[in-house]
Image: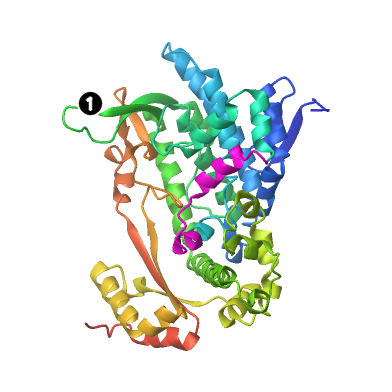
Amino acid sequence: MSDSKSKRLRDPVHGLIVFAETEPLDLLAWELIDTPEFQRLRRIRQLGVSKFTFPGATHTRFAHSVGVFDNARTLTKVISREMKRNEQIFDAPRSEVAIIAALLHDLGHGPFSHTFEGVQESRGVKKRHETWTADIIRNPNGSIRGLLERYRVGFCEEVAKLLEAEDPQDIYHAVVSSSFDADRLDYLRRDKLMTGTGAGAIDFDWLIDNVRVAEIDIGAPEDDEPVNKVSTFCLASKALPAAEQFLLARYTLHQQVYFHKATRCAEHMIGKLLRSISTVANNGKNVEKMTGLRKEHPLIRFFGKNGECVENYLALDDTVIMGSLNALTAASDKTISEVADRLCNRRLYKTLDVADVGHDDGKKRQRQRTITRDFEAEIKAGSVMIDEKASISIYSEIGGDDDRTHKKLHILDGGKPVEISRLSDIIKALEKKEQFTRFYFEKEEDREKAQRKKGQNHD
């Protein structure tokens, strides 16, 4: 770098984040932040369309990723402390891989993140953002790979592999994927702050002070094979009350923010819009007239035949889509023009939650069957959308697997790691998944018709 002085960023969650001129890894991180691939994250909101519901939720994956980097540095210091305490050797090069992987972990998010992944999956493309992230890091024509290789030969592949790994590997992997990883330690505090959600508390300093490293069992033994063990983050027993509050804060955010009915509705509408655009773009006929977008538009390029490459993916972000809404309202395709106009003016579909019959699971299932039967044609045509993929438990995770052992919080009890629900009645009570099933109606009269049948359900 031409200017090797320390760099600083002010952050509402972490305060002053310093990139020290005496630390080569910090200087590498600053160079990575300055790449086009990382700067793109300024144009992707952390909470997608939650701003429709929570006006303050305009923070970006750029700010989040820098916060995750700062958390990762803190967690690797914890690892170093615990290694000394346990008379083990701290692996400094591996810790550097974890810190940079934490910084770059969100590079592969598409516009509106998990909503975009859902659109891709409906098109038969099951490529998660973690895979896109690895592709972007490895891209020989990009800015990331060269910086990583200049720092250390083979560093690029080490970082990419750590981010791709689905199964827990070691304590350094726990920095980016565990019950107490750098990612959730940032987004929970940041989302809570920016949405104004008051319930739940996160005593970060106390939790960090009580983080320990211990081995947990993962997976079930096969025949005579021993149970697999992996080192991960656990908490000392005196941090149990703070751990309960940490999980309750996460639960509350899912309940009140991530699964808010208006947010979920807007996500489904954006999904409907993008699927319609992708159908027209892939067909390749009358694209400009039917979508209102020029053929060179990033959405048309990406959704067109053989368009799903890294370069086209990186051209997509939230601002590209939101900035295209006015043009999309002129589309000859009625679905595209109508949904775009609604999103422009926040005229969301009307929501009906099957839980309006009460908490009885049998009644809710009956209500869902009745509405599905009565509006079968509308559901098929897309004027009524059903949302039955949202469920919440104490371990809920956005777009992830919340049932894996290494993603569950463990407390040291008598020196041995114990999953927290075995020690806390509060957490145990919230282990059972609660299903959210909602219908979104394009026509208000259809919603009113379905609502009038409440209490008259029968099979």
How is the rendered protein coloured? Answer: rainbow
Q: What residue span does the magenta drawing correspond to?
A: 118-141
In which image quadrant can residue 9 be found? top right
- Residue 6 in the image: above or below residue 443: above
**In the displayed structure image, the side of residue 109 where residue 456 appears, left or right:** left
What amino acid type should be assigned to the residue bearing mark 1? Answer: Pro
**In the displayed structure image, the side of residue 379 where residue 145 appears, left or right:** right
Structural crowding at the residue carrying mark 1, measured as other residues with C-alpha within 10 Å and reported as few (<14), some (14–19) or many (≥20): few
Residue ranking furthest to the left: 223
The question of residue 458 being in magenta is answered with no
Task: Give the residue at x 55% y 50%.
Answer: 192
Q: Position of residue 208 (x, y in %)?
A: 50, 30
Pick the residue in front: 297 or 184.
Answer: 297
Task: Give the residue at x 67% y 45%.
Answer: 37
Task: Give the residue at x 57% y 30%.
Answer: 99
Count of numbered marks: 1
Pick the residue in front: 312 or 337.
Answer: 312
In which image quadrant can residue 378 be found? bottom left
Task: Give the residue at x 68% y 32%.
Answer: 146
The question of residue 124 being in magenta is answered with yes
Q: Position of residue 223 (x, y in %)?
A: 16, 31
Q: Is residue 192 visible?
A: yes
Of helix, strand and loop, which mostly describes the magenta segment? helix
**In the displayed structure image, the side of residue 42 where residue 434 appears, left or right:** left
Q: Is residue 71 visible?
A: no
Q: Position of residue 365 (x, y in %)?
A: 27, 71
Q: Position of residue 265 (x, y in %)?
A: 50, 69
Where does label 1 land, which residue? 226
Q: Which of the image's four quarters has the C terminus?
A: bottom left
